[in-house]
């Protein structure tokens, strides 16, 4: 039975150029990403072994780089990109990714816009 342990990175910040409006592609804006990994941490804890877990500093850098590169129209696409990075670690069974777009071009007052996706190994 696989343990349901988690590693969570919350509030990763990156400037991206994602969006359907031309000004979003030119000016860019802040995106905030939360990533939760589901995996077993038993082996890493038992052996105090970084190679048996996910180096969250490395993951954070990869996520920020993914948000900052290759502009797309939808934050759904950005979330999928981040989920695939998370699942590239062999020890990760599943991931939940939330991408926040707090400066989205919405004409009424709002606090945040976000999408959340959940992906697991097939």
Image (cartoon, rainbow, N blue to C red):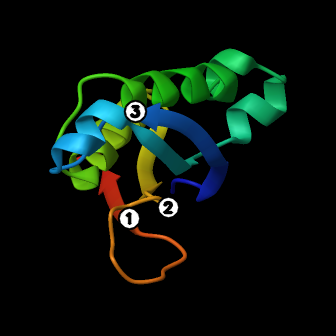
Q: Is disc 3 in contact with disc 1, using a CB cutoff of under 8 Å?
A: no
Is residue 114 shown left or right of residue 37? Answer: left
Residue 54 numbered mark, or none: none
Q: Which of marks 2 and 3 is nearer the N terminus?
A: 3
Q: Which of marks 1 and 2 is nearer the N terminus?
A: 2
Q: The residue tagged with tag 3: helix, strand or loop?
A: helix
**Mark 2 Cα-neighbour bin, 10 Å: few <14, some 14–19, many ≥20:** some
Q: The residue tagged with tag 1: helix, strand or loop?
A: strand
Determine which residue is flagged by label 3: 67
Q: Nearer the viewer, mark 3 or mark 1?
A: 3
Determine which residue is flagged by label 1: 116
Task: Tell me what residue is drawn at x 66 percent, y 29 percent.
Answer: 56
**Mark 1 Cα-neighbour bin, 10 Å: few <14, some 14–19, many ≥20:** some
Q: Position of residue 72 (x, y in %)?
A: 18, 38
Task: Tell me what residue is drawn at x 38 percent, y 36 percent.
Answer: 28
Residue 18 vs residue 38, the one in the foreground: 18
Residue 80 vs residue 27, the one in the foreground: 27
Q: Where is residue 85 in the image (x, y as percent from the top left)?
A: 38, 30
Residue 73 vs residue 90, the one in the foreground: 73
Q: Distance between the residues labelled 2 and 3?
A: 14 Å
Q: The residue tagged with tag 2: helix, strand or loop?
A: loop
Give above or below for 53 relative to 100. above
Give above or below for 107 relative to 43. below
Q: Earlier in the sequence, mark 3 or mark 1?
A: 3
Determine which residue is flagged by label 2: 102
Is residue 89 shown left or right of residue 41? Answer: left
Rendering quarter of residue 121:
top left
Rendering quarter of residue 9:
top right
Give above or below for 28 relative to 104. above
Q: Which of marks 2 and 3 is in front?
A: 2
Q: How far apart are marks 1 and 2 (CA)?
A: 14 Å
Q: Position of residue 48 (x, y in %)?
A: 84, 24
């Amino acid at each position: 039975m696989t343990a349901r342990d988690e590693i969570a990175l919350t509030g990763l910040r990156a400037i991206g150029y994602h969006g359907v409006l031309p000004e979003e592609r030119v000016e860019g804006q802040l995106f905030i990403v939360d990533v939760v990994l589901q995996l077993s941490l038993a082996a890493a804890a038992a052996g105090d072994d970084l190679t048996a877990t996910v180096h969250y500093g490395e993951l954070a850098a990869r996520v920020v780089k993914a948000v900052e590169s290759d502009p797309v129209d939808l934050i759904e696409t950005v979330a999928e990109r981040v989920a695939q990075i998370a699942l590239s670690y062999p020890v990760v069974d599943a991931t939940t990714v939330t991408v926040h777009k707090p400066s989205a071009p919405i004409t009424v007052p709002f606090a945040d816009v976000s999408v959340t996706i959940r992906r697991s190994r097939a």
